[in-house]
């Protein structure tokens, strides 16, 4: 079996910017162990696997190098880009059926690629003991998703505090077992953020679409606006435009193909 794959940098138009994701189109689902092995081999923050169900409709799953995750925004954007530009299926819109977050729509426009994700309702929570020390920064407040707290958002004092953050990753792993999103109001954008997920095998994610499902509603309420500009200030960096509409978040950004190839190693079919 020969499997096509491509590496797409999401939320950027720069060759070495944004968040790279591997995208693989499958004829049918492989065993989970094979999917996980492929994601580990790619060794990117996420690999997106697609199986076509009907024209412009695909089942979609996401794997980090160590496990499957319930939602990944940048790999969804990368999948839509791959379908439109590398597999030349169409320009969309595309519908993705996911296991844990329902249906996701992706569309292409002059502003870039847009993906519609569920907005995450959050509630205030206490900052875990030792978390601020592990981050190396003063934490003003924290909120967590009401339904599934696999990510928690921590507000820092300034955008400089977010940009200059140098967390102790080992200490962070010992203090919490969820993704750590740090954020502050931006100077050139409405807000900035970074995201750390060492327990998922990703010390720092370059640009995180799923994090903006909680970030966008948080800053929408804080700033009193539904249309927001965002910058994730990792070393690679990436920009997004966020629109909050009822219980959905539209994330719009650019993507660029970095490489394409074929996997020729033996693959076990389900």
Image (cartoon, grey):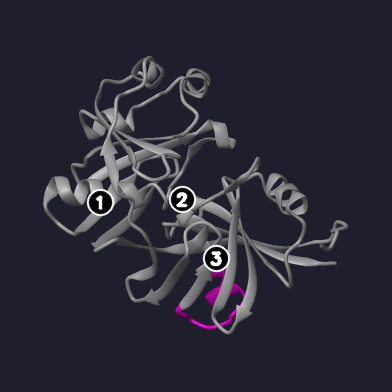
Q: Is residue 223 left or right of residue 31?
A: left
The residue singled out by tag 1 in the image is 217
Q: Residue at x 45, y 79 (%)?
A: 93
Q: Residue at x 36, y 15 (%)?
A: 129
Q: Is residue 80 left or right of residue 147?
A: right
Q: Choose mark 2 or mark 1, whichever is in front.
A: 1
Q: Is residue 136 left or right of residue 9?
A: left
Q: Choose mark 1 or mark 3, whichever is in front.
A: 1
Q: CA distance from mark 1 to mark 3?
A: 24 Å
Residue 190 in view, yes or no? no
Among all residues in the image, which is located at the extreme left?
224
Q: Is residue 187 left or right of residue 250?
A: left
Residue 226 in view, yes or no? yes
Q: Secondary structure at mark 2?
A: loop
Label whose residue precedes the other's in the sequence (1 or 3): 3
Q: CA distance from mark 2 to mark 1?
A: 25 Å
The residue singled out by tag 3 in the image is 79
Per the rendered image, the range of residues in magenta is 81-93
Residue 133 lies, with reference to residue 116, above or below; the image says above
**Residue 147 % position (x, y):** 39, 45
The residue singled out by tag 2 in the image is 17
Residue 220 lies, with reference to residue 253, above or below; the image says above
């Amino acid at each position: 079996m020969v499997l096509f794959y491509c590496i797409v940098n999401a939320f950027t138009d720069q060759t070495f910017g944004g968040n790279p994701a591997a995208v693989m189109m499958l004829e049918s689902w492989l065993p989970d162990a094979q999917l996980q092995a492929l994601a580990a081999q790619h060794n990117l923050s996420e690999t997106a696997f697609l199986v076509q169900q009907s024209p412009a409709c695909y089942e979609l799953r996401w794997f980090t190098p160590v496990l499957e995750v319930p939602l990944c925004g940048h790999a969804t954007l990368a999948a839509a880009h791959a379908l439109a530009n590398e597999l030349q299926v169409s320009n969309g819109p595309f519908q993705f059926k996911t296991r844990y977050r329902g249906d996701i729509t992706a569309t292409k426009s002059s502003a870039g690629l847009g993906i519609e994700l569920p907005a995450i309702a959050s509630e205030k929570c206490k900052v875990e003991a030792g978390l601020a020390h592990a981050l190396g920064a003063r934490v003003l407040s924290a909120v967590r998703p009401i339904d599934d707290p696999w990510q928690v958002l921590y507000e820092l004092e300034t955008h400089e505090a977010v940009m200059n953050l140098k967390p102790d990753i080992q200490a962070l792993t010992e203090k919490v077992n969820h993704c750590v999103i740090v954020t502050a109001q931006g100077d050139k954008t409405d807000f900035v953020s970074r995201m750390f997920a060492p327990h998922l095998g990703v010390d720092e994610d370059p640009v995180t679409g799923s994090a903006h499902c909680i970030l966008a509603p948080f800053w929408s309420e804080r700033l009193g606006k539904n249309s927001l500009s965002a910058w994730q200030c990792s070393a690679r960096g990436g920009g997004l435009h966020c629109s909050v509409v009822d219980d959905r978040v539209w994330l719009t950004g650019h993507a660029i193909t970095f490489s394409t190839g074929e996997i020729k190693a033996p693959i076990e079919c389900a």
